Amino acid sequence: MLGFAASTLLVSAVLVTTTWLLARSFVVEQREQALTQQAFADAEVLRTRLSAAGADVGGVLGELVPFGDAEVVVRSGDEWYSSSLEVGGRDVPAGLQEVVAGGAAGSLRIDTADGPRLVVAVPVVSAGVEFYEVAPLDDLEALLRTLGLVLGAGAVAATLAGAGFGAWASRRAVLPLEQVAGAATRIAGGELSTRLPPTDDPDLVGIVAAFNSMVDALAARISRDARFVGDVSHELRSPLTSLTTSVEVLATRRQELPPRAQQALDLVEGEVSRLRVTLDDLLELAWFDGAGHAPDAVPVSMTALVREVLERTGRPLGLLAAGPEPETTVLGDKSRLERAVRNLLDNADRYAGGAERVGVERCDGSVVVTVDDAGPGVASLDRERIFERFARAPGSARRSVPGAGLGLAIVAETTAQHGGAAWCAPSPQGGARFVLSLPAART
């Protein structure tokens, strides 16, 4: 919009300046031509009157009728005669006198204490005199000033109108792009039902149709992938259940097995447990991918929920540092929020030597759950990556630490579904702090 207004101002300024200069040139030229014609006519009258016997310059000068407010000055020899006391030989430029003395006519614009004047000189050779007609240009200057003000006001009005039109035109041109950007942002946030509204603009019909078709295809692909993961996970549950039952039966007869068989049983038992957790996580993520709607929302006290998780998992309640329960209430799916908190605690046990503090507090309009661990912290480059699916601890820890790298991904998906966010930051106690922030329920 500013660029459009600046362009309009520049064009207006050029047009105004050009118009004013042309008008000034035309008006001055017309005034000069009119005064010159009148001066020649008055000079001819003067010559005719002076040719009569007994005529004198002073008497003839009093009979002349000059053009408008013009005054007449006549030089005869060394004597100067004037039709007014305000004008005399002092007002005739020396250069113009030399032109007339050479037998040529001329004109010259001069600036005096009384304002600008135009002097027209005509030699009257037969009468032996020099004829000068002096006309004030005050009215002409006033006219040009008025014209300049009018043109300037027109330029300002044109600039304002141009700025208004530019704002309207740019808004009209950018609005479809803003709608596309807004729709893309909502889709990136998981609102796959978002579509661009139909339009009658022929230039946008194709774009809107292509965008909506792309979103339809994307939603179908995500739904198909989610169903595939869910179907695979469900199909694996039956054999996994059978395998788990078989391992449990073998575990009841563990003492009857030789030492090497017991070691193999322990290995199988651990891997089956890990596989069961991984399948549960995959089913949970498949639900997030295919849900397309907000979770069931009921009032949940995060203080009470964290306390229940600590009790259920056998962790000391002394880890909890929480505010009053009414102030830490959110609206959400209790089971999924409980799982998110449990995943944060399990992550601290698995990678950082356990949790040292679990905080729950109200911060502005959010309820914030923090888990501070006893580990060395997380490198700044990995603080976002660890919330991705199948992200594992870097380096050699990747293979030695159990888990499929889905726990923190479920935390991130859960908070996003509840309108919140999850992130990792340095802990004041030296380790890592995992933060789960959720919108607080209105009281």
Image (cartoon, rainbow, N blue to C red):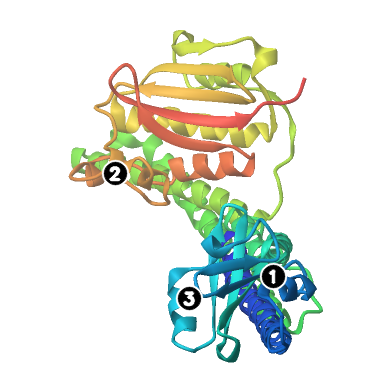
Q: Quadrant of the N terminus?
A: bottom right
Would you call the spot at circle 2 few (<14 residues within 10 Å), some (14-19), or many (20 or more)? Answer: few
Q: Residue at label 1?
A: 58
**Rendered residue at 56%/57% (across/down):** 112
Going from N to C along the chain, the mark reached first, 1 or 2, is 1
Q: Residue at label 2?
A: 381
- Mark 1 secondary-structure assignment: helix
Q: Quadrant of the C terminus?
A: top right
- Mark 3 secondary-structure assignment: helix
State the image quarter where residue 164 is shown.
Answer: bottom right
Would you call the spot at circle 1 few (<14 residues within 10 Å), some (14-19), or many (20 or more)? Answer: few
Would you call the spot at circle 3 few (<14 residues within 10 Å), some (14-19), or many (20 or more)? Answer: many
Q: Residue at label 3?
A: 96
**Rendered residue at 71%/81% (across/down):** 54
As rendered, which of 165 and 251 lies closer to the eye?
Answer: 165
As rendered, which of 139 and 409 lies closer to the eye?
Answer: 139
Going from N to C along the chain, the mark reached first, 1 or 3, is 1
As rendered, which of 229 and 324 lies closer to the eye?
Answer: 324
Where residue 138 appears, x then y in whole percent? 68, 61
